[in-house]
Amino acid sequence: MKPIKLIVIGGGIAGLSAAYYAQKRALAKDIPLELTVLEADDHWGGKITTDRVENFVIEGGPDTFLAAKPWGVALCKELGLAERLHGTNPRQRNTYVLHRNRLEPLPDGLAMMIPGKVGPMITTRLLTWPQKARLGLDFFIPPHANDADETLGGFISRRLGRACYENLIEPLMSGIYAGDGDQLSLLATFPYLRDMERKYHSLAWGAMSMYRQRLRAQRQSGSRSVFLTPTTGLAEIVEALAAYLKEHGADLRLKTKTSQLESFQVATFKPVGLPTFQHGWDVVLDTEERLQADAVILATPAYVSGKLLASLDPELGSVLESIPYVSTATVSLAYRQDDLPRPLDGYGYVIPRREGRRALACTWTSTKFPHRAPDGYALLRIFVGRAGQEDDIAWNDDYLLDIAREELRLTLGITAEPFLTRVFIWEKAMPQYNLGHPEKLAQIDAALTKYPGLALAGNGYRGIGIPDCIHSGEEAAKKLVRKDIVDALS
Ligand SMILES: Cc1cc2nc3c(=O)[nH]c(=O)nc-3n(C[C@H](O)[C@H](O)[C@H](O)COP(=O)(O)OP(=O)(O)OC[C@H]3O[C@@H](n4cnc5c(N)ncnc54)[C@H](O)[C@@H]3O)c2cc1C
């Protein structure tokens, strides 16, 4: 039997997961597979990058993943990392919102960002009394009758009032998408909010029910943490994936940039009753080397995938390129505990857009994950960059460090020299699922039916979080590593 020659382009979490599940499926189903993974950068993991320095664990990109989406935990279990997964610190769980230059506690009882407990919403200083009264109208406003999409900002404002959106929901949502809620598609980002509206005729009733369910599930599972991460950082997942692939003979190539994807007709294929597998692929590298493949998984950002496909299929290429991405940066700063004017008694704070700050949020990493800084030191991480503010920022280390230090001075009164700093700049990193995104996905899916040997994976399509990216990789592997394809090739 001829092996399926599969090339995965992009060695972020989506590409490595695609390669892992492809290899695993091939072994489980006795499918011969020749697997190559191409990565432009000099390290695996893409946005997942962990710096372990002077006994600090510093995440450059993501720092945790959502436990409720099953694909992250499942992959970690398979890789033997289950015992190494930690939740966030259960003893100091405060999160704050910057409001009129003061840190106000995030009201307790939020379920998927929506207030699910009445008491904390009555006492919170994030809303005035008239704004709280407006929030209460949610119990009486009928759901939208039609299925049309709307912006996330429009939806929340319609149900809970604009102030609740701007002061509470917008900064939480920004932490996920770095996006502009007045552009983001409700159906592409938080479709369950629409379902909640339909089912409960009120977001608050829905959130109350979800909050109770979550507490029950956490009591049953014994875990209270919504987020998980391996002991010495998310790079553990990347390292385990790369080790697995190496052990199983995959050809793993770093510093190997793909510049174009071409397809050609394969002369031998079996027509009747079997899926036709007409396309073979030429993967053209920037060195002009050409690698041939029967199947290709594009696990690059959508705009890169679009460029790679542009000459083969201009229409598909341009839809992919039209998915916008926002640049962001993280700045980590370590201090001696004695240099901090106030205790870091929680996970950190988020900053609403309307506060006019250049930073987006600040994580108190050494409280959120106490093992990530040595005794006597604190580690903080500032996020910079969100949709609509990119042109106001000079994307270089010194400027970003200045923004971070200014933020820490204004909000926490920290003026000491940091013991250590790390800046990570992520150019065009966060896809924006704006209004029209579901229609783009439909166009992409329709175009892909022409290419049975091509699959897309990654954060540009159906979920930006790590579990979603892992899932996208697994789905791509399922599409391309199949017995009938080997039969068609042989
Ligand atoms: C600052 C930040 C914080 C985040 N925080 C969280 C979090 O806490 N939890 C969470 O779940 N998610 C978080 N996310 C989102 C999540 O990290 C990403 O969505 C996810 O890691 C993207 O994975 P990916 O494989 O799709 O893309 P990437 O990681 O971007 O991987 C794509 C890879 O393709 C490579 N590539 C590009 N062009 C080419 C080419 N021409 N040839 C070959 N290779 C190429 C790139 O070098 C890259 O390695 C965060 C993201 C950022 C930026």
Image (spheres, helix red, strand yellow):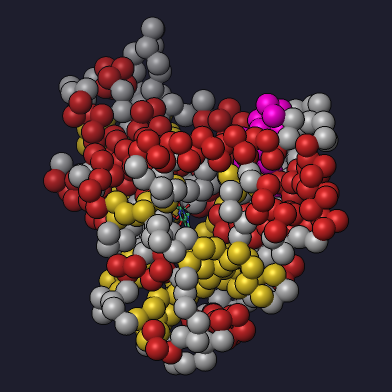
Screen quadrant of the N terminus: top left
Residue sitting at x 68%, y 26% = 199
The majority secondary structure of the magenta stretch comes to helix
Residue sitting at x 41%, y 69% = 367
Q: Position of residue 63 (x, y in %)?
A: 41, 60
Q: Position of residue 485 (x, y in %)?
A: 32, 21
Does 176 appear above or below 248? below
| Residue extending farthest bottom | 416
Q: Is residue 477 visible?
A: yes
Which image quarter: residue 158? top right
> What is the span of residues highlighted in magenta in the rendered image?
182-200
Which residue is at the front of the view, 208 or 453?
Answer: 208
Q: Answer with left or right where residue 154 lies relative to residue 367.
A: right
Q: Position of residue 70 (x, y in %)?
A: 39, 37
Magenta segment: does it hold 376?
no
Q: Answer with left or right where residue 174 lies relative to residue 344.
A: right
Q: Quadrant of ligand 1?
A: bottom left
Does 483 appear above or below 315? above
Magenta segment: does it hold 195?
yes
Q: Is residue 471 visible?
A: no
Screen quadrant of the C terminus: top left
Residue sitting at x 82%, y 35% = 140
Which image quarter: residue 17? top left
| Residue extending farthest right | 130
Residue sitting at x 79%, y 44% = 136
Which residue is at the front of the view, 331 or 258?
Answer: 331
